[in-house]
Amino acid sequence: MKAWLASLALLAGCVGEPRAAAPRPQPTIVSLNPCSDAILAEVADPPQILAISHYSHDPRGTSMPLDVARRFRATGGTVEEVLALDPDVVVGSAFMDPATRAAFERLGVRVETLGIASTVAESEAQVRQLAVMSGHPERGAALIGRIESALSAAQSDGPPVRAVLWQPDGIVPGEGALVSELMRRTGFANQSAARGMGQADYLSLERLLSDPPRVLLVAGNERGQRHPLLDSVPGMDRAAFDPALLYCGGPTIIRAAKRLAEIRRSF
């Protein structure tokens, strides 16, 4: 009996303390959405991001600095390209083709989608979603903190300045667009909305000149947006606004708020 007990004690000593479970590896990701590209570059580890969308490598379509975007591989978004990279997760737009989504899921690839954020709150929810998905919720919280700090710093105490944001193709944002909220929060009154114009309505040069705003934010390069008559409109100032700041939330909000605040404080 004593020999048996001694053997049992020896065996227990060999087993020792139970080993902690190995940390679960963070998921690898392919992003097919330029807005998720920009967020993931902030919240995921670079090796996790197997590829981003080709839009982010295009100066006309990116919502993140090109030098940052070009650190990552880009794809055209085909199922074949994505599957060749063997990601754990694909992040796409809410408008992803149902057949494409079904193909990914059938082959065991998790799919996350992002809609168009029309408010700061919706954008911050997307930041949380992607940060949790990538395994770094604390980075999402940190990015949201930076967004809120930027918006707080960009607030204006003066009366709102009447402004029109003239976007590419001569259109204006609707009252429910994210950039319209950013204009309000940085001290501008959206004059196109006051005229009853909605999302993506076309604003002609003639209509603009018939009731000019105090500030014209030009984010396009249409012929009318470069017309010499704009130089002689009394009481109206113009300022350039980078089109790359128009369409995405996340870290883009920080840059957009800073630019709007710079313009607002110059009047």
Image: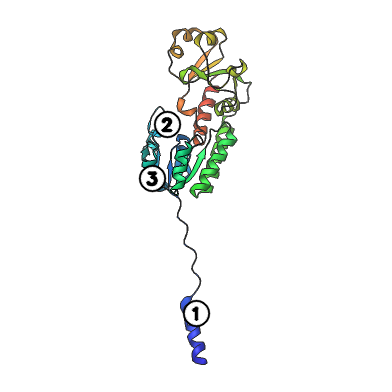
Residue type, numbered disc 2: Thr
Q: How is the image coloured?
A: rainbow
Which quadrant of the structure image shows residue 30?
top left
Q: Residue 197 in the image: x percent, y percent?
A: 58, 17
**Residue receiving disc 1:** 12
Q: Quick check: 208 above or below 53?
A: above
Residue type, numbered disc 3: Leu
Q: Is residue 109 in view?
A: no
Could you say which is closer to the camera, residue 114 or residue 35? 114
Instruction: Report crowding for label 1: few under 14, some 14 to 19, many 20 or more residues within 10 A (C-alpha).
Output: few
Mark found first going from the N terminus, 2 or 3: 2
Q: Residue at x 47, y 41 (%)?
A: 101
Distance, label 3 to label 1, CA atoms, is 47 Å
**Residue receiving disc 2:** 62
Q: How many marks?
A: 3
Q: Quick check: 227 above or below 157?
A: above
Q: Quick check: 206 above or below 112?
A: above
**Residue receiving disc 3:** 83
